[in-house]
Image (spheres, helix red, strand yellow):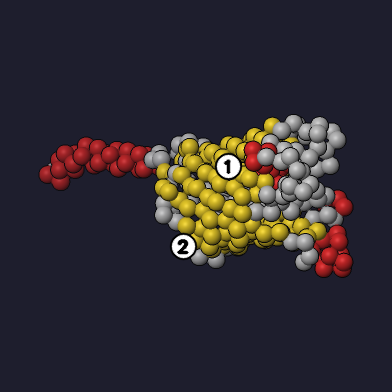
């Protein structure tokens, strides 16, 4: 009888304790946390990703594009006519990154800023902004004797919106505005718009396949240029990320690949290249 009475007295305590435990479990499962590593590299291939440099991290990036494979033996299957971009990226803090680069087209200075992180049980996407100002170094005075400093300037503004769906798949949209003070095609507006898109699929512990494409939205009908498509793989070695890819664009600056892509996958006019990132 005493044992039964003791059990009856302890039963409410056990029930309340169980409810408190379930409440803690529900609270833990609904907690918000930042989603990490939608992309492992600062770029998908050509297009900027929503990944930010961590505070105090200094990246040195070598981006290289060989010549067109369509040139075959005469072009050493791409070894001739190669271009290179050297870039330094520094994380001023976890939400703002600055960079300086020298590419095939321009000297440029840029900033990338995290507006909102993707969250587990919270905000469903990551949103970042990217802006840059470039100086077109390919416009030679002997070809354009009336060229002024301001004619060489290029402005870029992008909104980067990504979502990491699971540990393997991440996708991104990148609506872009860029303005070239000088354009080769007289019928082309200086202010141009493009919609970039790309994704990453992780198929092994350290390997992923990456694809990006950009649709130019107001290209002149007389323009000789095309939309860029790039396909490649990322290798994450821990200390750095090594990206290898094929692209219809040899250009690496935004105006270079968004507005001035010359390659054509259908004709085999593609360029093999790599991006090598090292963090200090």
- Image x and y of residue 272, in percent: 74, 60
Q: Nearer the viewer, mark 1 or mark 2?
A: 1
Q: Is residue 126 above or below residue 102?
A: above
Q: Please indicate whether residue 99 sits to the left or right of residue 221 in the image.
A: left
Between 62 and 147, the residue placed more toward the observer is: 147
Q: Residue 196's spot in the image, x, y percent?
A: 67, 40
Mark 1 vs 2, N-terminal side: 1
Which residue does the image show at 65% across and 54% down from the upper left?
Answer: 103
- The residue at the point 60 percent across, 58 percent down is 86
Residue situated in front as seen by the camera: 185 or 150: 150
The residue that appears at 80% across and 43% down in the rendered structure is: 225
Q: Position of residue 64 (x, y in %)?
A: 67, 60
Mark 2 sits on what residue?
A: 280
> Are the residues flagged by discs 1 and 2 in contact, CB closer than 8 Å?
no
Q: Quadrant of residue 13?
A: top left
Name the residue nearer the viewer: 117 or 155: 155
Res. 132 in view: yes
User: Residue 156's quadrant in the figure?
Assistant: top right
For label 1, the SS is strand
Give the left or right position of residue 187, taking residue 251 as reference: right
- Residue 206 placement, left or right of 141: left
Q: Residue at x 41, y 51 (%)?
A: 55
- Residue 132: which disc? 1
């Amino acid at each position: 009888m005493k044992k039964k009475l003791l059990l009856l007295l302890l039963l409410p305590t056990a029930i309340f304790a169980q409810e408190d435990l379930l409440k803690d479990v529900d609270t833990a499962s609904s907690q918000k946390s930042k989603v990490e590593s939608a992309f492992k590299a600062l770029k998908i291939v050509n297009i900027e990703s929503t990944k930010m440099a961590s505070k105090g991290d200094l990246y040195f990036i070598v981006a290289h594009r060989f010549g067109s494979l369509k040139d075959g033996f005469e072009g050493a299957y791409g070894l001739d006519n190669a271009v290179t971009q050297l870039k330094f990226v520094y994380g001023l803090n976890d939400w703002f990154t600055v960079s300086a680069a020298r590419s095939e087209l321009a000297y440029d200075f840029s900033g990338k800023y995290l507006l909102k992180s993707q969250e587990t049980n919270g905000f469903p996407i990551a949103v970042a902004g990217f802006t840059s100002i470039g100086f077109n170094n390919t416009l030679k005075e002997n070809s354009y004797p009336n060229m002024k400093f301001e004619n060489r300037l290029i402005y870029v503004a992008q909104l980067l919106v990504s979502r990491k769906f699971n540990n393997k798949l991440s996708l991104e949209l990148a609506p872009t505005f860029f303005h070239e003070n000088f354009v080769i095609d007289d019928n082309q507006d200086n202010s141009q718009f493009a919609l970039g898109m790309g994704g990453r699929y992780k198929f092994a512990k350290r390997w992923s396949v990456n694809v990006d494409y950009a649709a130019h939205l107001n290209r002149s009908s007389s323009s000789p240029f095309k939309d860029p498509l790039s396909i490649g793989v990322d290798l994450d070695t821990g200390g750095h990320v090594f990206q290898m890819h094929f692209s219809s664009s040899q250009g690496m600056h935004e105006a270079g690949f968004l507005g001035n892509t010359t390659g054509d996958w259908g004709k085999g006019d593609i360029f093999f290249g790599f991006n090598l990132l090292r963090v200090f």
